[in-house]
Image (spheres, rainbow, N blue to C red):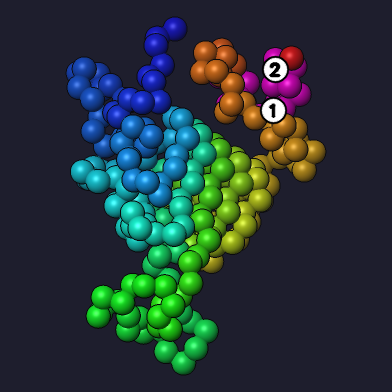
Amino acid sequence: MPDFPSPDTRNPITLPDGSLHEGTVFLRAAITHPRFHVGDYSYASAFDPPEDWAARLAPYLFEHSPEALVIGKFCQIADGVVFVTASANHRYDGISSFPFAVFDGGFDAGRPSLPGPGPDTVIGNDVWIGQGARILPGAEVGDGVIIGAGAVVAGHVPPYSIVAGNPARVVRKRFSDDQIARLQALAWWDWPIDRILAQEALICGGDVDALEQAAG
């Protein structure tokens, strides 16, 4: 079995000619942003790879932002995905949403034209986010979710569901409630990578009983 790349590898795909595919990165190796937290083996792809992957994926997540973007392990992020984090918010509970304080250097907390700190955005493990999707501030996406291309996702997305549309809605569950609970208890993404690769067929298959048996 060939060596699987370390999660600290920036460009983990080697093309047939031996060159590295610059358009795909393991995010843990590519991002050092202090408010961007990402698990092992989660990757993003882009047809025009940026120098700054954090800015491409989460353009409103600043180093001084109070919120964080948290992405679990083994997530798959397609080209054009954007996380619109809470620092992009304006106030919308009053007469005007105009951020007056931004234009005279008044970023200090307490200015009436600025919203208070917003929630973190949290993405679970083994989440596939399709091309051009937008993940809105404070979204909580469960383990094993598949997000359709172009979806606009807000709020809580249940584990192992498929969502699509604007606003995104659950299209269907990938497994029964009992199977979903068992898969989350198995948490295969926490296994050592050698064990994961040894059970690749079962992890990528649909037989929960067989995966439980293999997990022992």
Residue 123 in picture, x, y percent from top left:
53, 47
Taking the spot 33% from the left edge, 25% from the top edge, the residue there is 9
Query: Where's residue 133, x and y in %?
Result: 43, 55
The residue that label 1 is drawn on is 186
Q: Identify the mark nearer the N-term, 1 or 2.
A: 1
- Position of residue 32 in the picture relative to residue 184 (left or right): left
Badge 1 amino acid: Leu
The kind of residue tagged 2 is: Ala
What secondary structure do most residues of the magenta stretch adopt? helix
Identify whether 67 is placed above or below 190: below
Left or right: residue 20 compared with residue 138: left
- Neighbor class of circle 1 (other Cα within 10 Å; few <14, some 14-19, many 20+) is some
The residue at the point 48 percent across, 62 percent down is 137
Residue 188 lies, with reference to residue 167, above or below; the image says above
Quadrant of the snapshot with the N terminus: top left
Per the image, label 1 sits on a secondary structure element best described as helix
Mark 2 secondary-structure assignment: helix
**Residue 212 included in the magenta stretch of the image:** yes
Q: Which residues are magenta?
A: 200-214
Residue at the spot x=70%, y=17% of the render?
215
Q: Are marks 1 and 2 in contact (CB under 8 Å)?
A: yes
Instruction: From the image, tell me which residue sits under label 2.
Output: 215
Residue 107 marker: none
Q: Nearer the viewer, residue 178 or 155?
A: 155
Q: Residue furthest bottom?
A: 95
Query: In which quarter of the view is residue 53 placed?
Result: top left
Q: Position of residue 3 (x, y in %)?
A: 39, 11
Compared with 170, 204 (above or below) is: above
